[in-house]
Amino acid sequence: MNNSKLRAAVVGSTGYGGVELIRLLQSHPHVTVTSVISSSSAGSPIAEGFPHLREIRTDLLDGIDVELVRSKADVVFLATPHGVSMKLAPDFLAAGMKVIDLSGDFRLKSGDVYREWYKHEPAAQAEVDRAVYGLSEVYGAQVYGADFISNPGCFSTAALLGLYPAVKAGWINPDSIIIDAKSGVSGAGRGLNLSAHFSEINENFKAYKLNKHQHTPEIEQVLSEAAGRPVITTFTTHLVPMTRGIMCTIYAAQNENRDTAQFVDLYRRFYEGRRFVRVHPAGHWPATKQVYGSNYCDIGFSTDDRTGRITIISVIDNLVKGAAGQAIQNLNLLMNWDETLGLQFTPVYP
Amino acid sequence: MNNSKLRAAVVGSTGYGGVELIRLLQSHPHVTVTSVISSSSAGSPIAEGFPHLREIRTDLLDGIDVELVRSKADVVFLATPHGVSMKLAPDFLAAGMKVIDLSGDFRLKSGDVYREWYKHEPAAQAEVDRAVYGLSEVYGAQVYGADFISNPGCFSTAALLGLYPAVKAGWINPDSIIIDAKSGVSGAGRGLNLSAHFSEINENFKAYKLNKHQHTPEIEQVLSEAAGRPVITTFTTHLVPMTRGIMCTIYAAQNENRDTAQFVDLYRRFYEGRRFVRVHPAGHWPATKQVYGSNYCDIGFSTDDRTGRITIISVIDNLVKGAAGQAIQNLNLLMNWDETLGLQFTPVYP
Amino acid sequence: MNNSKLRAAVVGSTGYGGVELIRLLQSHPHVTVTSVISSSSAGSPIAEGFPHLREIRTDLLDGIDVELVRSKADVVFLATPHGVSMKLAPDFLAAGMKVIDLSGDFRLKSGDVYREWYKHEPAAQAEVDRAVYGLSEVYGAQVYGADFISNPGCFSTAALLGLYPAVKAGWINPDSIIIDAKSGVSGAGRGLNLSAHFSEINENFKAYKLNKHQHTPEIEQVLSEAAGRPVITTFTTHLVPMTRGIMCTIYAAQNENRDTAQFVDLYRRFYEGRRFVRVHPAGHWPATKQVYGSNYCDIGFSTDDRTGRITIISVIDNLVKGAAGQAIQNLNLLMNWDETLGLQFTPVYP
Amino acid sequence: MNNSKLRAAVVGSTGYGGVELIRLLQSHPHVTVTSVISSSSAGSPIAEGFPHLREIRTDLLDGIDVELVRSKADVVFLATPHGVSMKLAPDFLAAGMKVIDLSGDFRLKSGDVYREWYKHEPAAQAEVDRAVYGLSEVYGAQVYGADFISNPGCFSTAALLGLYPAVKAGWINPDSIIIDAKSGVSGAGRGLNLSAHFSEINENFKAYKLNKHQHTPEIEQVLSEAAGRPVITTFTTHLVPMTRGIMCTIYAAQNENRDTAQFVDLYRRFYEGRRFVRVHPAGHWPATKQVYGSNYCDIGFSTDDRTGRITIISVIDNLVKGAAGQAIQNLNLLMNWDETLGLQFTPVYP
């Protein structure tokens, strides 16, 4: 019965992150979405702009009204841009709701760093401090019982799940890390932009925001925690002519020469019992399509005796493990449910 | 518990139809796949060729061995090419199994017609007569309780769901029907072929098998039943540079001038209570992506006073409603379960 | 020497049609582009928005200034939207320039028909009457010596080159014609629109403007001329997830049963000596990629004894033969040059 | 007149490299292709397998017959796989022809290195020594007057044009170089392979041959020459779901901190007068589409004060500058013609 289910509201339901939350939550056994919210399209049916939801969601979009949302829901997902989440989260928290924010507003613990990379004033430090950074497989223990989750960035998720165990174990030199990231175009959202115009992107491959991407400090913050000292990295993002999928190709110098099998073993032990990280055996590297539409992060390795470097390949679906899926995984952890609830999708292949 | 579930075997598990059956059946509440079968790769793990299944299916592929399959399963899906299914189905039926065949071998009631279009000797007439043509929304009553289902072709499904109500109602002239069909490339299967080679297909749009496609007589057989007299049609297939999705754009002369709203009403009444057909209101036509990864067939209309013709747009995911999904829907009907079991996916969008 | 070359100006140089004119004219032996014009970006380098032109075109965009353009150029190409061309053409004509307009403003001889399909007031009848409809292979004789050309629409070009010989010969019933057209997304232009947003179009196939597309009356006007009586048609447009290319799949009832070889022969005779129409032998149908980046229109046929219908497949590159290329071909004809000058590109394959 | 033109033969005319040579040579003012050669399809029209060439090339494919080729042509392009070129080149050279080989057989000066990376016995050292490595902008002086050119690999061309000036100038540490390369699928050729099967590649991004790609030693050989000491690098290749285009994203530690503008200046001086390398100003990075169908290599930079590293972006069309285009550029240099002859294509955009 719906009455016994946790009631969820999704703010930003007309963006790709919001609509993916709705897709996934539709089949969650313990959650029901009771309010889909969009400031720009309030009052119109959500299926109007998203005909794939026809006859699945027949409700109208709500406006942003904290009291209304509080009356309808227990937990609110903020699938809103940075700068917007920081305005909304405090009120929902004050109303006693659990809040899971998908923006970058509460990820960086330092306001100065936020200001530098986002070119925007940071959120109040009190809320920043209160937010738990929800990289599920790394910080799951902190997520349990929290009421305010800051969901990681899409690139950060792929990069960090690929790097954390090796940095934590001291097997690679943190100063040598270079992350070459590639993303499908849905990561750029539904807002109109020449950079997401079909004829400009199709049959094209491009780099963007070199040395300026706002996920850089988020990655460095976690790696610094893992390394126990400040870490800076080179992080580059590219746009791939496809809709979904992120690959991070990560390069680092090893601290002593180990082979691929040892890394496989290290990672399998680190992620033991965590269903959504799949570590590939030596000689196999994941491709983005093998996690399409699913919450998996697949990881593979190649060590090179000639250079002493290791190359780590990490892939996710940017809208699932990189956004909506991990947000739900965090809800599951927070509620002390099995973390896979509602997320046991087999990837869509081909 | 698995013990209480229906046990299913999938023959042809290394093709796209077979692997889609596995994806969908993984989340079916009443079915468990106990044997994945491939004559060419028996003995190797299914996840080796399909890494998206890693840690989801850890079993090895079985060979084709009727006794083995009988010992492991209650129902067998034949995701095998035409010419192969006709060799396998009789033995599985004789062993007392339920058989759902996805090939074209048992769809055409006339052996002569089969021979003409498939350029191959037909199956034995006894088995052809025994097979129920599983166009779920049209012949669901016959499927109920049957033990041998011939699952419709992908193009046939989209074309027939788009045409059946209008032909049955006598609203269009059957002799005037022209079906212009477009399909994603996964419909061509996983076998290597220059026609499915990436660089030949990407940024390309092509027509093929003009006036020769083997789904033509299947469509005509059903339309003839609906019209109560022999119907022949013009049917053209095209390849779209995308992986999944079929659209049929269907043209017909109306018998008397009606408007789009009347067709919407006719179709909604015809498909009332059937969850997987979504009839669009006037002014809206479906696109293939809005059914991606799901079992929906979405239909829209445009009548034209100038010409007296109606244009009908019908879309499906060729691997789901056009193959694996409808096969499972037929299993549900056959077992007298809710036809949506295991198929309640929200389409993957974008 | 440039001094002896014909000087050309391109208005609308920041759209896809304009930039394609520039690409093609760069290698025209008798023409030099002396002014690239954009009302919205005047004063900035054209290569800023189009980096593929870096070091090829280093000039700044001019604003729209008839006297300036007249001082710099002899011929002006209007790659401007409908509604804009009708404002610009009269002044350029009055200034004594040759004008080649790529919009729909001067294609329809009847103002009433224009008003109905374009939902816009028509151009002055005097200029409409003066404009020669530049379907090069059909009306080339009229183009010769003209000073004002209305370049055909992209869909119209593909449809009409595929239909004209058969209608003119009386081999098909004009009332039975159905044109199912498919286009790459560049046809929608560079203006931002959700319908051209990458994640909405990629892996998607959609129909649009059913029974309402503004190229319909243009096609009918020419077919009526060919048939010697009014013709109306059914014309449907679809968007293909690719950048360039149009295919028209055309259906018609034959007036008496002929075979494909007879149609091949009819068309080869009709287009004899015209280098840009390539008629395929029986059993071969063209795909869009085989004309990519070139000015070819490739045509193939399939007759069907069962239905008495013929299917005609016609393909072009929408930006070349469907726009910029045919405009240059018309310039060549108008100047009494070899019609292939500057257009002898081999298609880019793959 | 053709009589006065240089006569060229293309071996391997049914591969993508060969057919691209034909496309480009069709418009070369001083060259005529007199023989298109394919061992597998000899005797059939080349346009049969490549309908884009219909009415452009009406000749039949020749078999591989040195005397025949010698009687018809002055220069031969070998667009053949490694292992095959080493068998053919000696005979054509012995017959007094100029030979331009596009395979990897004559690129590596050390037979041992060839054996290690190609897993194949090397060509005879005499011919290896005789071959000039045709990286046009770097070794153009050696190409002039040579009769045997080994054309660089596609990845090598993009990587080396992006790296050579900085290594030569001693501005970066050669031991720190990491090359993250991405290629369109046409680089994999026309041979059927699951890795180039449309449904496997579309909407997918994958890495391959980590630390094993055979272009690695070729890149290292040239960088070692530039650095004046042995250099080893990390080189990774990825497959992008598009047909044409290569991007190399290159990372290196600077030897002292310089800014992007200094690198722009260095590269502009190095490539001064060379039309096919376009160096982007600070803040602009090239995308692959802006060189589509053309012989350009576009390069951009981003230095990072935080890490002391520089990121270099280099893009080419893999079939033009990465294969057929550079081969023709080398022919031009070898003949002491303007290096741009027949290659002055404006990129096809969009």
Image (cartoon, coloured by chain):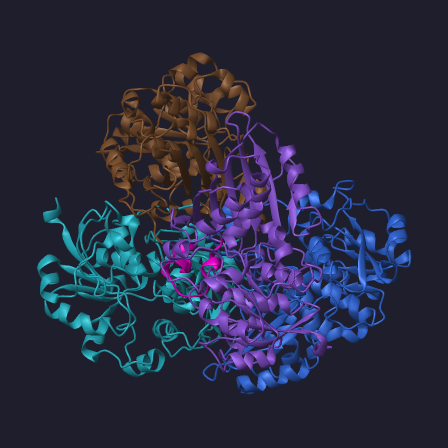
Chain colours: A blue, B purple, C brown, D cyan
Considering every residue shown, the one lying at the far front of the view is B126
Residue C265, position in %: x, y?
23, 37
Q: Position of residue A231 (x, y in %)?
A: 66, 73
Residue B290 is left or right of residue C151, and the answer is right
Residue in the foreground of this view, choosing between B86 and B127: B127
Q: Is residue D332 above or below residue B72?
A: above
Q: Residue B79 versus residue A284: which sits nearer the camera?
A: B79
Q: Is residue D267 visible?
A: no
Secondary structure mainly formed by the magenta segment: helix
Q: Quadrant of residue C19?
A: top left
Nearer to me, C102 or C111: C111
Quadrant in the picture for the N terminus of chain A: bottom right
Rendered location of residue B139, percent (x, y): 60, 53
Q: Which quarter of the picture shows residue D116?
A: bottom left
As drawn, D219 above or below C348: below
> Percent x, y for residue D330?
25, 59
Report the side of B50 relative to D98 (left or right).
Answer: right
Residue at 64% x, 65% y: name it.
Answer: A294
Which sits in the foreground, D108 or C191? C191
Q: Is residue B192 magenta?
A: yes
The reply to whether residue B184 is in sight is yes
Extent of the magenta region: B184-201
**Count of labels in the image:** 0
- In the displayed orientation, state which residue is furthest to the top: C126
Reply yes or no: does residue D40 show up in magenta: no
